[in-house]
Image (cartoon, grey):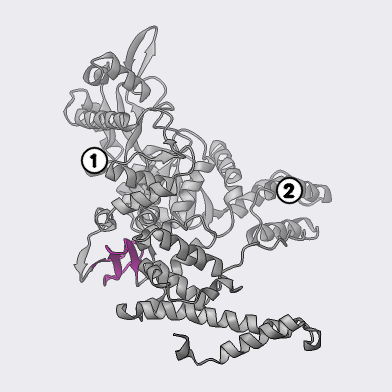
Amino acid sequence: MAGKIPQQFIDDLLARTDIVDLISTRIQLRKAGKDYQARCPFHEEKTPSFTVSADKQFYYCFGCGAHGTAIGFLMEHDHLAFPEAIEELAQRIGLEIPDQGAPVRTGPDPAPLLRLMEQASALYRQQLRDHPQAARAVQYLKDRGLSGTIAARFDLGFAPSGDFLLGRLGCGGAEQAKLMTCGLIAEQDARRYDRFRDRIMFPIRDRRGRVIGFGGRLLGDGKPKYLNSPETPLFHKGRELYGLFEVQQSNRKIASIIVVEGYMDVIALAQFGITNAVATLGTATTQDHLQQLLRTTPELVFCFDGDRAGRDAAWKALVTALPLATGQQSIRFHFLPEGEDPDTLVRRLGPEGFTARLDEAQPLSTLLFEHLEQQVDMTSMDGRARLANLAQPLVAQLPQGIYRDLVLKRIADLTGLPTPRPVRDTRRSTRAALPVRLSLIAQAIALLLDNPHLAAHTGACDDAWRRSTNPGVDVLGQLLDMLIDRPGMNKAAVLERWREHPHFRYLQRISVDPFLQDIAEEHLVAVFVGALNRISEETCKIERRLPFNQSSTTQWSAEERARLKAQTQAARIPRDKLH
């Protein structure tokens, strides 16, 4: 995405998307009155409590409280970022995403390249079954203990020697150009040839399951033993993780993810029922990798070799993780015994034994201080001072908060230095926070969010509520004005217009507040109008009392006395004579 997606496009996208159709492609829904129900995909349950409303284009779980729009569902269920969720919905209904009035993509449409990658993957799979040269590949996989079932789950294939793929998919110049763009063929001395030859092929999928690259394991002699696709318009190794799509497909709830070093480790663990492993693609762990993973799971466990190279890789991953380490998610490190990798260890110990070893993985902070202490003499004052100096630039990368304060305290305990006083952010927000409990204003907002058609019933209301100084009145005013200008919006479209607002999560939550369930449909208008009128009454009462709070009545002007008298008389007129 090159820039911000226009709001009008998001409105149109949601208007054309049926949340029931979308969710039914992920979980099985059954009709229940005018809504649809299912077992919640976000928590374990025996009785369905997950409800999808076709009218409101909104889902809600009465068991765990999960709720949102079609966009929110893709973000939570498929672990997509907001732009990715928009792109997924746009592709489903065939819309091109605009960007400030211009096409989002600056390059060619990726769809033809993605189709070509799927074709290549299918051909490689077929060769593993049918090609005479594939016998060695099959035997290698058997020797590694892999079953046909697990090979099929990860769509393993075989690239024969020679220019097999070029012959099948590169009949013309245009086709060969696409193969070059995808990194499937290479060129040297004006001759084009297959990049992957005599290799077991591992398709690399993005989070949406699309083949974007390949890894190939050489069967014969030569180098490199493992070869990945080069950087292409589809494939960026610093952003992609092997096996992440399969982890999402295999686990309803992803409690943790294990980061290992190779394809075979991911597949071997999956064969033993450990279906939450991913691997980086021939590169060190990047911040993009970590951000993806921490959006997906509350716990990461890095599983590296115990040799020098493995410990160096772990340290690099730790340093990369520091800006994301808040303590709210667990980041731990496990080092394998010498001569072992996850593949061999799980076969020797079994899945229970392997998992038990991971339970003993070191927290990030433990590895941090262990690494620093190994570089200094902790028995001397100079050594402890040096530790503090070594730690300083590392701790500076940690986000401010409790976790950082605890790390600083640990440094103080180790060195005998006083604990640095944490920096407090004394700046006050310029925005008034919405109240936690549902005030009258919050109730009015919740009613509007859940039932946008109520905006049409404000004509008879006193609009004195707009002068209220209570928290949230600005949100209520903006929301009501928007709905009056744009009648016909459903709940999903309304909420998505507030996604960038600092109180978006709160607005989503009150839109499903239990008090809404207690209001019969025929009483909605009366309850909403009544709430606005009561806010107006409270506002007028406050305004009438204001003169008493300003100064002594002896200091009032004649004009102020007349205004107060008129307000008092108006307040005494029986309510029924005002209508």
Q: What number is the disc on residue 81?
A: none
Which class describes the residues within 10 Å of circle 1: few (<14), some (14-19), or many (20+)?
A: few
How far from the left and from the top, in percent, is residue 573?
53, 91
Q: In the visual, does 192 lie left or right of 282?
A: left
Query: Which residue of the protein is positioned furthest toward the top in this rendering?
Result: 189
Question: Could you tell me which residue is drawn at 35 percent across and 49 percent down?
Answer: 12
- Highlighted range, magenta: 35-61
**Of residues 571 and 143, which is closer to you in this image?**
571
Q: In the visual, does 191 lie left or right of 305?
A: left
Q: In the visual, does 367 lie left or right of 336?
A: right
How far from the left and from the top, in percent, is residue 78?
36, 51
Question: Could you tell me which residue is drawn at 20 percent across and 71 percent down?
Answer: 33
Which class describes the residues within 10 Å of circle 2: few (<14), some (14-19), or many (20+)?
A: few
**Residue labelled with disc 2:** 392
**Residue labelled with disc 1:** 152
Question: Amino acid type of disc 1?
Answer: Ala
Q: Does the magenta stretch include residue 55?
A: yes
Instruction: Assign a secondary structure to mark 1.
Output: helix
Question: Amino acid type of disc 2?
Answer: Gln
